[in-house]
Image (spheres, helix red, strand yellow):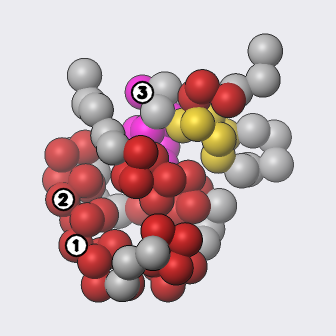
């Protein structure tokens, strides 16, 4: 099973909301190039080639849940 860090989960959640890399970087407190690098490693681990596919795979694997407003929330916070 794929395991991701809290930072990776946060980045995926922001990507699911269509936040640009600069906003993801600001939210994580790192540079945009660091986010690009981290996402490249994460995408390789996930076996995906881009942001949309990463969000879809994460959702299918239960790492993110996308609600009716297209906002992704962590699995643990999914409403009952």
Q: Is residue 78 visible?
A: yes
Q: Main secondary structure of the magenta part?
A: helix
Q: Provide the residue span drawn in magenta.
A: 54-61
State how far apart marks 2 and 3 are (Cα).
18 Å
Which label number is shown at residue 41?
Answer: 2
Q: Residue beneath label 1, please?
A: 37
State how far apart marks 2 and 1 are (Cα).
6 Å
Q: Are marks 2 and 1 in contact (CB under 8 Å)?
A: yes
State how far apart marks 1 and 3 are (Cα).
23 Å
Figure check: 59 above or below 37: above
Residue 72 as seen in the image, left or right of residue 69: left
Q: Residue beneath label 3, please?
A: 61
Residue 23 as seen in the image, left or right of residue 29: right
Image quarter of the N terminus: top left
Tell me if mark 1 has few (under 14), some (14-19) or many (20+) residues whose alpha carbon lies within 10 angstroms of its own.
few
The residue lying at 78 percent from left, 15 percent from top is 80
Q: Nearer the viewer, residue 4 or 65?
A: 4
Determine the secondary structure under disc 2: helix
> Mark 2 vs mark 3: which is more N-terminal?
2
The residue lying at 53 percent from left, 62 percent from top is 15
């Amino acid at each position: 099973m794929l395991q991701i860090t809290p930072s990776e989960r946060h980045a995926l959640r922001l990507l699911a909301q269509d936040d640009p890399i600069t906003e993801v970087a600001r939210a994580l407190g790192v540079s945009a190039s660091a986010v690009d690098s981290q996402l490249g490693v994460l995408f390789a681990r996930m076996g995906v080639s881009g942001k949309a596919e990463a969000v879809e795979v994460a959702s299918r694997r239960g790492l993110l849940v996308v609600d009716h407003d297209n906002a992704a929330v962590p699995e643990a916070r999914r409403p009952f």
